[in-house]
Amino acid sequence: MPLTTDNPLTLEWTTLQNNFEQYERSALWVKLVTVALFVVGLLYGMPSETAITLMLVLWLQEAINRTSQARLGTRLRHIELMLRRGDDDNGSACQLHTDFETSRGGAGALLSEYFHNALRPTVAFPYVVLVVAQLVLGAG
């Protein structure tokens, strides 16, 4: 299947890839806000409990965003496989939500997904470092 802009799978891949990259930028912004919060909290004497709670909320927010990004990544890989195989079935395009619904678990699975994404090293940094630093510096 040629990779032209009138190919529905190519159009879907391009759209999803742009969104995937937007999640990367959003994650960076969440991290930068967290670092700024840490610095401002230290400068203005924010109670450690408040600062840590806010940092944990931001960490969870990034984990939620990364979970959504991972879903896009799954669909992107599926589209790439179809393009590689030369699938010519236009009915395969634009099935992001349908594909997700067929593999979706319950609330426990979703929470587990958030938790596992939060523990990925690229997500956990800088939150773990900042929480520990807040505990050490905020106590002094």
Image (cartoon, rainbow, N blue to C red):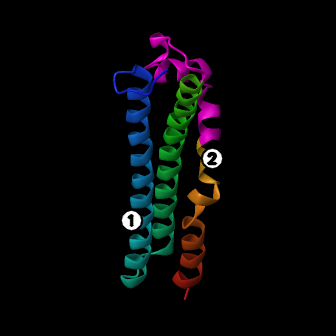
- Judged left or right of residue 97, residue 82 is right
Secondary structure at badge 2 equals helix
- Residues at marks 2 and 1 touching, judged by CB atoms closer than 8 Å: no
Q: Residue 115 has which mark?
A: 2
Magenta-drawn stretch, dominant element (helix, strand or loop) = helix
Q: What range of the chain is rendered magenta?
A: 85-113
Q: Nearer the viewer, residue 11 or 25?
A: 11
Q: Position of residue 5 (x, y in %)?
A: 34, 27
Three-letter amino acid code at the position of disc 2: Phe
| C-alpha span from label 2 to label 1 | 21 Å
Residue 12 pos. (x, y %): 41, 27
Where residue 75 sits: x, y (%)?
A: 53, 29
Q: Residue at 52% x, 59% y: name it.
A: 56
Q: Residue 109 colored magenta?
A: yes
The amino acid type, in three-letter code, at marker 1 is Val
Chain-order first, disc 2 or disc 1:
1
Say few, some or many: other residues with alpha carbon within 10 Å of mark 2 (under 14 / 14 to 19 / 20 or more).
some
Q: Which residue is mark 1?
A: 33
Figure check: 121 above or below 110? below
Task: Please report the residue visible at 44 percent of the width from the left and 71 percent of the height from the top.
Answer: 35
